[in-house]
Image: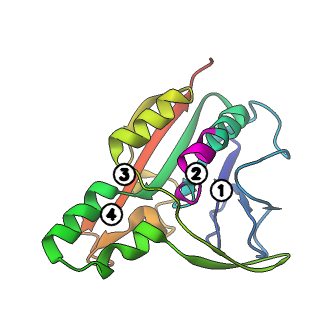
Amino acid sequence: MKKVHLGCWHREIPGFIHVDFCDMEHIDYKSGIDELPFFDDSTIDLIYCSHAFEYFDRNEAVAVLNEWFRVLKPNGILRLAVPDFSALVRIYKDTGQLGSVLGPLYGMMRIDTPSGPRNIYHKTVYDEASLSDMLKLNGFHHIERWDWRFTEHAHIDDHSQAYFPHMQKDSGLLVSLNIQARKVAR
């Protein structure tokens, strides 16, 4: 199986091809995740992208999904994790603390790239219905939630395992919307 980890940053998953524009040793392709010219059509079995898709606005997201659709094999899996707007609203309502949700909402991150440091920000947010609709409109089907505990990358502590309060994985609220879908021929 050919598996790709997009927007991996410092997280390395054994057996995956790593793509990010960060300048880190484990990254196989130092590139943005929106254009994947180094992969041929229909050659990837699984794309995993944790908390990087929201860095594209809704218009950009269409082109990104089209590119990911292009490289996935028929019946290939797109596994996404993004901040869960519904969970963030609940946290804000329960705590009244804006600071508890600012990071997942706006997500400023400073990264090192081959051309120097760069700040990137979240440009949108999703709930389950809006992300499912976006995926359907772009040719994906069999859309369902996935549980990080039952993946081959469960041992990698990334944002798909983000909880409030922080690190309370047994009793906290999951603030990551983990959705996967399959490529079905158009």
Assess whether mark 1 and mark 2 are in contact (beta carbons under 8 angstroms).
Answer: yes
Q: Which residue is mark 2?
A: 48
Mark 2 or 1 closer to N-term?
Answer: 1
User: Distance between the Cα atoms at labels 1 and 4?
Assistant: 20 Å
120 vs 7: above or below: below
Q: Which residues are magenta?
A: 54-62
Give the colour scheme of this rendering.
rainbow
Circle 4 crowding by C-alpha within 10 Å: few under 14, some 14–19, many from 20? many
- Residue 89 in picture, x, y percent from top left: 24, 62
Q: Amino acid at mark 1?
A: Leu
Mark 3 or 4 closer to N-term?
Answer: 3
Assess whether mark 4 and mark 1 are in contact (beta carbons under 8 angstroms).
Answer: no
Quarter of the view holding residue 20: bottom right
Relative depth, front residue between 114 and 9:
114
User: Distance between the Cα atoms at labels 3 and 4?
Assistant: 13 Å
Residue 182 visible, this angle? yes
Q: Amino acid at mark 4?
A: Val
On the rendered image, what quadrant is the C terminus found in? top right
User: Distance between the Cα atoms at labels 3 and 2?
Assistant: 13 Å
Assess whether mark 4 and mark 3 are in contact (beta carbons under 8 angstroms).
Answer: no
Q: Which residue is mark 3?
A: 147
- Does 40 sit left or right of 86 as displayed? right
Mark 3 or 2 closer to N-term?
Answer: 2
- Residue 55 in picture, x, y percent from top left: 57, 60
Q: Which residue is mark 1?
A: 6
Q: Which residue is mark 4?
A: 175
* 58 within the magenta span: yes
Q: Amino acid at mark 2?
A: Tyr
